[in-house]
């Protein structure tokens, strides 16, 4: 009579080691992924602000001053309001409409959370037509 001594399969120690290695790799990869995603979200805001800048220049050429968010949105550029591009809200600050010295404006991008709440992340873009200088501050810098 022959006795079978070979067993097929993995020992508990081998399975435990595989789980530990996978856990270590995941702990290294998840922060990198989150950092990558935040950079992509910031790039989205910078792209929308770039579109707003182009729209503001068109508006300035037509009217002689920069417009507010109500004039720029839908008439010259459409701000993302649905789908995956709703991670930021945008506000435009300009001098009084029609002011002859309205040669500056500031666009503020405020990060929103998935449930529609406002996160503490903001970034500003300021353009001065007189000096030709732009300034990025906050998270967008």
Image: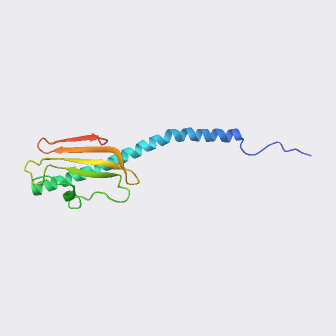
Residue at point 53% right, 41% down?
A: 26
Q: Position of residue 37 (x, y in %)?
A: 41, 46
Toward the left, the furthest residue is 100
Residue at point 34% right, 48% down?
A: 111
Q: Nearer the viewer, residue 83 or 69?
A: 69
Is residue 112 positioned above or below 23 on the image?
below
Is residue 14 positioned above or below 68 on the image?
above
**Way the structure is coloured:** rainbow
Q: Position of residue 19 (x, y in %)?
A: 62, 41
Toward the right, the furthest residue is 1
Is residue 6 positioned above or below 96 on the image?
above
- State left or right for residue 40 relative to residue 54: right
Q: Position of residue 125 (x, y in %)?
A: 23, 44
Toward the bottom, the furthest residue is 75
Toward the front, the furthest residue is 117
- State left or right for residue 56 relative to residue 39: left
- State left or right for residue 90 relative to residue 18: left
- State left or right for residue 68 relative to residue 63: right
Residue at point 50% right, 38% down?
A: 28
């Amino acid at each position: 009579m022959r006795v079978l001594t070979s067993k097929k399969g993995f020992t508990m120690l081998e399975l435990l080691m595989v789980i530990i290695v996978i856990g270590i790799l995941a702990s290294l990869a998840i922060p990198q992924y989150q950092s990558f995603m935040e950079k992509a979200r910031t790039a989205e805001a910078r792209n929308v602000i770039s579109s707003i800048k182009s729209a503001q220049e068109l508006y300035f050429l037509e009217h002689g001053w920069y417009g507010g968010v109500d004039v720029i949105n839908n008439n010259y550029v459409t701000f993302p309001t649905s789908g995956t591009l709703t991670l930021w809200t945008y506000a435009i600050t300009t001098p009084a409409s029609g002011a002859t010295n309205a040669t500056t404006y500031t666009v503020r991008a405020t990060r929103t959370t998935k449930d529609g709440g406002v996160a503490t992340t903001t970034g500003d873009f300021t353009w001065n037509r007189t000096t030709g200088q732009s300034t990025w501050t906050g998270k967008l810098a």
